[in-house]
Image (tube, coloured by chain):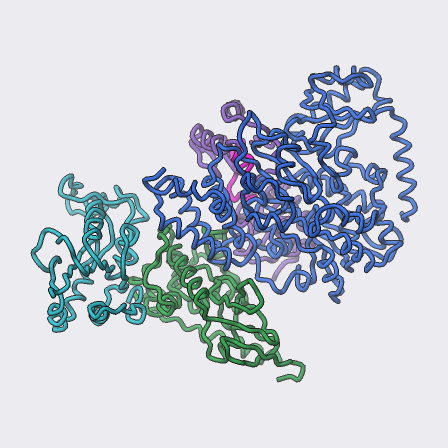
Chain colours: A green, B cyan, C purple, D blue
Amino acid sequence: MPTSVKVKTLRIDGRDVSAREDQTILEVARENDIWIPTLCHLDGLSPVGACRLCLVEIKGSTKLLPACVTAVEEGMEVSTQTEGLESYRRMILELLFSERNHVCSICKSNGHCEMQTLAQRLGLTHIHFPYRYPSLPVDLSHELFGMDHNRCILCTRCVRVCAEIEGAHVWDVMGRGVDARIICDLNQPWGTSETCTSCGKCVHVCPTGALFERGRSASEMDKRPEFLPYLTLMRRAGGE
Amino acid sequence: MSKPTFATIWLDGCSGCHMSFLDMDERLVEILDQVDLVYSPLVDVKEYPEVVDIALVEGAVSTDEDRAKIRKIRAHTKTLISLGDCAVTSNVPAMRNYFPVDSVMKRAYVENAAGGGVIPERGLPKLDPRVCPVHEVVHVDLFIPGCPPSADTIHAALTELLAGRNPDIAALTRFGA
Amino acid sequence: MILPPEKQPMPSDDKRWRLVATAMRRHGYKSHGLIESLHSIQETFGYVSEDALKFTAKMLRVPLSQAYGVASFYHYFNLKPLGRHSCVVCRGTACHIKGSAQILSDLEQLFAVRVGETTEDGSLSLLSAQCLGACGIAPAVVLDGVVMGRAEAESIVHRVEEVVAA
Amino acid sequence: MIFEELGHIEEAELEAQSRFERRIHVCAAAGCLASGADAVKEALSGELQSTGLEERCQMVGVGCMGLCSRGPLVSIQPDNVLLAQVRAKDAKEVVGTLGKKPPKRLACPSDLPFFKRQLKVVLENMGRIDPERIEEYIAVGGYSALHKGLTEMTSQEVIDEVVKSGLRGRGGAGYPTGLKWSQLSKESSPIKYVVCNADEGDPGAFMDRSVLEGDPHRVLEGMILAGYATGATQGFIYVRAEYPLAIKRLNLAIKQASRLGLLGHNICGTPVSFGVEVRVGAGAFVCGEETALMASIEGGRGTPRPRPPFPTQSGIWGRPTMINNVETFANIPPIIRNGGKWLAEIGTEKSKGTKVFSLSGKVVNTGLIEVPMGITLREIIFEIGGGIPFGGKFKAVQTGGPSGGCVPDSGLDVPVDYESLSHLGTIMGSGGMVVMDDSASMVDVARFFLDFSRHESCGKCIPCRVGTVQMHGLLDKIAANRATSEDLAMLEELCDLVRKTSLCGLGQTAPTPVVSTLRHFREEYLSHLSGKA
């Protein structure tokens, strides 16, 4: 550790922990085996603080703060598992399930889906908000991969991995609000993209069954996002 | 004291949850020792009894008939349990929700029928424009997701309930399990 | 080889592209000029076409998906050509209180068009604005760029009918 | 130009004006233009010409005179005559009665409570000067604050005066302006930005629009002073595309100021440099949120990002950036001219100065008003506004647009300031004030704002993106008398969730219209629950 980096001590859920000053609450929590749920966050991609699942309480602040982007501070007292937070997290997940058509039983990622796993871990047994049932397309124009917008949660991991790691920036978000959608190039079928390198990184960082490899059947799409931290580590090492 | 009364109900679902229920095999006997099965597709009772202690509902609410039925059942049931993803999330049956009812009917009875079928005018319950989970129509006391929930899950949930405890469902199953 | 922006070919012989290119040059062909470029495209052509987006993306070296993402984020940009006439009904609070919803629904009915869309014959685009900031004269309607204040549902609908028929 | 020359311009302009016996001011702001002010101005000019009076009477298009509901407005100086609802066909009569008793049917007494109860600081030049001529601004003392600031005061002294004035951000949240300025000034980055937020998107608000259209140089002057005080050399004005006239006049003002050396390198021979660029929004309410606004200036989708880092730490292109609202900047020149203490004497303990409101809805006098902080809502609505038209009964006043709430009759006597409005469950906001009579349904009002919020949600964070849609759905259900008490409970649960967990201010305040109407008009909601209404 370079000498210029200072160490800070803080409390997370009553435990004293120490951290480098440039670390986020999420990083420190994970180092100390304190679990904070996340969906949009992925090690190796820029943080966006969008899913709001990692919100934590900080003593002295009336606002809930996203652990993924909040830097540690000396003497900070963080609570990650209060009853209020748990209830908010469940409701946020419920909103996601109600937003599009997540029919888990027939999903390629059934059993390997981060959202599904989170729902179970947070004790969600049903969605009490009314389902919206929007009519959304499935793009099967690419010869290797598919995109099912019904299962997309707009975490933008695909957008970020493609722009930040692959450097192709095939994906972006169009529109806004509940009508926002992930698009390929000029909102065109994936198979017609001139910028896609068919690297498949987007597929493997996708937390749900929205992006998948073709030819897989229900429950067969196991994602391997582990390449990412490795890749970013190697790149950083290469750059030094 | 008499045994608690028990019912199972089949709305819009594939009956997979009932199959899973039957998959409890010999444990069924153990369960049935503790309850009085008073109403079910598995038994030949036409009228829903006045009071049922525990009822398992499989399937989503798809038709006017389902709707009327579940309302009536709710009124006569103490603990109503949504069993399986169709009841809990409306699951596969709700995949017709993106299409208007008449095109769904046409697809099923005309386009997919060999030799030009017709949409039957009688004997069919009227499809609701939108399939919905049971709890959007009536109050539900417990949710057991899964497609289908495993026999172990059903067994564990029923055992806990019969022992007067509240089962920790999320520890047993999840959506799509 | 990537051509510098000055050397990029125009999408067509249409001289108006030069106006657009000038707007881009004003921002040094930098990606932060994207929204300003889209403004100039819409001002010049009335809408932002796919060709225009491709051209902009190339000139400003912005990914295609980003150009589309930005253009579709801002409701001021039309990604489809507008009708011969346009009618913008303000949906701001003051206009709402004074009955703009009625004006909108009357127009929708009369011209068989949904707000945000153009009639089949291309004669009228019916649009709405969140607030035109003309609350003092609510309800406000903009017909072909002219603001009409204190609009009465009946007279407005009549006026639009006249203009479209003319 | 050097600063001393400002005096020459002022003299020349006053001298030119004194050659005329009279000035006819025709309102050239959006409201009156829509009522036909252009045609009135043309007709009056024509009439002056044909009567040979054009040498003796100067025609001036001026900024908003406030009483938009009675436009087009014409004022004749120095006779202090105000004419309302003037039509082109009235031109002959108006010109014919110059210097005499004005036509009775047009005359509007200038001692109406609408005018008398106001206190104009920000709007002091409105209706007095031609916003398209910098000379007129200079002739009423314009740019003298800049002169004073840049030549007689250190940048710290400028900040000190702003701190002393107690001025708080007029964009809605009321953050102390001086504090923000000193935060930016402490940043060591060689490049810093000052941004004027003119993305006034609240439905029911047109204060910023009127200021930009009626007195654009005042905003520029405030921005240049901010640049000097904080060490920023580049400014942006982010204006909504829906305000084409404001954009035109701003660009013109920038051109004029640059020509005189009041903008650009080495302003008037001082070492201070400051440039301003107009950036035009494109129809996204969320861009009024400062981090979204910055994303938009960078050319991207206007989606907010979490704070910290705050813009003053890391803003546009990662550089320290300070964002103030139009009205905030417009307050700066008088503060520097008269000293911070002068402004601090107006208003309440915690809210200093005046506030501009756009008064609209079911009220007799709709238009643009400026009042001292601490005035009551009742005075605004019933004295300045003239009460409810057609003998209607007041029900509620909505302030703060989609982030604000409704105040019922019982709250009308509370003095207007940031804190008291917040106690009433609403916010000061940027100044939209929409009056509703008893024909308004509060469920419908809440539904209207949620409809707005769900359409304006950027979609980045889940609670706002989906939560607002679910809330709107529930309000639909309630309005249609199909909802149950569980639905109402769900609505309240969503209010709490969206407020506490959304990423930005838009989401965090989106539930306010529901929360506030539930607080003050709960029985109305209850009467809609199924089987009851």
Residue D124 is situated, as x and y percent measured from the top left of the image, at 77, 38
Which residue is depicted at the point 22% across and 56% down?
B59
- Total residue callouts: 0
Residue B166 is situated, as x and y percent measured from the top left of the image, at 27, 68
Which stretch did the figure color magenta? Answer: C74-97
Which residue is depicted at the point 36% across and 71% down?
A222
Q: Nearer the viewer, residue D442 or A126?
A: D442
Q: Is residue A187 left or right of residue D312?
A: left
The answer to whether residue D198 is magenta is no
Which residue is depicted at the point 8% across and 55% down?
B45
Q: Is residue D97 left or right of residue D375?
A: right
Compared to D240, does B94 lie above or below?
below
Compared to D140, does D484 lie above or below?
below
Q: Is residue D392 left or right of residue D83?
A: left
Q: Nearer the viewer, residue C121 or D404?
A: D404
Q: Which image quadrant: the N terminus of chain B?
A: bottom left
The answer to whether residue C79 is magenta is yes
Residue A190 is situated, as x and y percent measured from the top left of the image, at 43, 58
* Residue, far left: B44
Residue B155 is situated, as x and y percent measured from the top left of the image, at 20, 70
Is residue A197 among what the camera can see?
no
Compared to A16, does C73 lie above or below?
above
Is residue A84 among what the camera can see?
yes
Compared to A146, does B152 lie above or below?
below
Q: Which image quadrant: the C terminus of chain B?
A: bottom left
